[in-house]
Every structure is written in structure tokens, then in C-alpha cells.
Image (cartoon, rainbow, N blue to C red):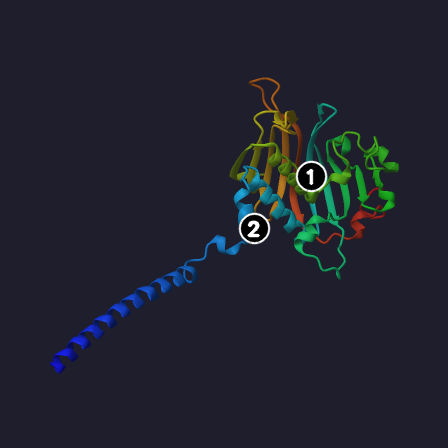
Amino acid sequence: MARQGYRVWLTRLTLCGCILLGVFGVGWRMIWNRWADETLRPVTSKDLVSPKAEVESTNSNPHAIDPLLEFARRALAHHCSEHRDFTANLTKRERVAGKLLPASKMEMKLRYGSEDPTAERTVAERTVAERTVSVYLKGIEPKSQAGREIIWIQNKNNNKLTAHEAGLMGLVTVELSPQSSLAMLGNRYPITEIGIEKLLRKLIEKGERDRLLGPVTVRRTENVTLGKLQCTLLEVIHEEPTVEIEGKQVEFEFYLAQIYIDEERLVPLKYASYTWPKTKDGAPELEEEYTYEDLLLNVGLTDADFDTKNPNYRF
């Protein structure tokens, strides 16, 4: 009887042990799975942002203009960080006082002001601050402007440009305010607005404005030939000339804008904008167009390139 009782108690203890082991096993498995789920799961983008950033990301709405803005900001940061100067042949076509003027072509040299080498600034900080520029222009076409030369050094010479006309009129050199009526004759913008950095900043300004005003159509076309180069063409289209904002009609600046991008060097080589057709079946009308041909970056321009005493110039 004693031996039989011992077997009964041993059986009960074994059964209790199995039950406890099972409960412990289930509990341990639950703990392990939870830990593994939190610790060993793949990392996602949510793990890389704060809760606040996640909320801001969720509330932001993508816009068709975003790829253009992303390019312009990236290109501006790169240009400010990597490019000190450039030369090019600049061809422009502009509508001034309602009249589309003939295309003009000019040799161009532009150098950016050097930064304080002791100043520690990030790329973003260099992007925010506009660099000063020195500019030299020499007319090539049309024939009436061939030989015209202009030099403007920002913040020098009372901020005036120095110029002489082509031909016999080139015997007289004048100094003018860039915004004066004589300096602005036949020009849509003053010389103070010239250059790739200015163009990129204008693209950002126009893109941010469009983003606020509402929907636009953006087309991207790759491998578009521009001179000898293959470019990416971005086109921004406003189907309607106005949009209603808080009960008021706000006008868009253009019907169509075209930006030709050199993807390899991350610079825009051409910008053109058009207004709306005057008739239903009419073509858009060109307002302004600027093309940089034979662009060379970081050529090592010196003070002599912007000196009226340069023996290669006719000042």
C-alpha cells in the first residue's frame, strides 16, 4: 500500500511539473516573440524619424512641382559649393514693352566672390547667402551689337557698370547704374540678375509660388538634344491663367516654362517661358529665353578678366 501511494504521488508531481513547464513555456514564448518583434524586425522609415517628424510627413501633400524644386535646391547647393566661376556664350530672347526683340548672343565671363577661408559654413548656409559676382560681356550677334563690352563688379565702382558700344561709338566709355534707362534699353532685366546661381534661385522662387497656388502639370523628357549635349527637359504648364485663392483671382506668371538640365554637371542650360495663346488654336507666345552654350566651369578667372585695362578689351 505504501509503495502504491508513493507511485500515485509521483504521478501527480510529474503531472504538475508538466503543467507548470507548459505554462512557463507558453509565457516565455510570448515574451520572446514580443521582444523579437520589437528588436529583430526589419528597420523601416518610421524608425528613422521622430513622432513629430512622422506627423509632419503625414500631413504634407506631394505636389507635381516637387521634382523641379528638388532639382533646383540640389543644383543650387552644388553650384554654390563646387563652382567658383564659368564662361559661356549666352543667347537671349526677350519681350520688352510688349515686343519680342531679336535674339542676341554674347560672350560671358562670370566669377563669384570668394568666401572667408576661416569661416566655417555648411553647404546649406552657403546656399542661403547669395554670392557677389563679377561679370564681363562682349556682344557677338546681332552685327549691330558685335564688339559691345560691359563689365560689372558687384559692390565696386559705386555698383556701376562700365560699357562701350560697338564700332565708332566704342570710342566712348560710360559708367551707368544697372537700373538706369540707358542700361536697361533693350533688356528685360538688369545685369544684376544675370548668371546660373540667379537662375536657380528664380526657379526655386517660382516653384514655391506655384506649389502654394495649386495644381500644375509637369512633364519630364529625357535625352533631349541641346546643341551638342543631351539634356533632361522639365516643362511646367498652367492650363488656366488664373486660380481662385480665398475668393480672389490670382494670375499665374506663365503658361509654359521649359528648363533644360545638364544632369551630369547638375546645371540648367536653358530656360524659356511662354504666355497663353491669344486664340484657341494659337501657339504660346515667347516671353523670355536664355541659353548657355559652350559652358565651362571653374576655368580660373582672375581680376584681369574684369579689368577695363585688359589689353584684349577695347575700353
Check disc 2 and report the residue beneath it.
52
Give me the C-alpha separation between circle 1 and circle 2. 47 Å
> In the picture shown, does residue 112 fall above or below 27?
above
6 or 229, which lies in front?
6
Q: Which residue is mark 1?
A: 90
**Residue mark closest to the camera, 1 vs 2:** 2
Residue at the outermost front position: 1
Q: Is residue 83 visible?
A: no
Check disc 1: other Cα within 10 Å, few if <14, some if 14-19, many if 20+.
Answer: many
Give the crowd class for mark 2: few <14, some 14-19, many >=20 residues within 10 Å: few
- Image quadrant assignment for residue 105: top right
The number of discs equals 2
Q: Residue at x 60, y 21 (%)?
A: 277
Q: Quadrant of the N terminus?
A: bottom left
**Residue 42 image position (x, y, % from top left):** 42, 58
> For this rendering, which residue is in front, 302 or 143?
302
Question: Do residues under tags 1 and 2 come within 8 Å of each other at their CB atoms?
Answer: no
> In x, y percent, where is residue 260?
59, 39
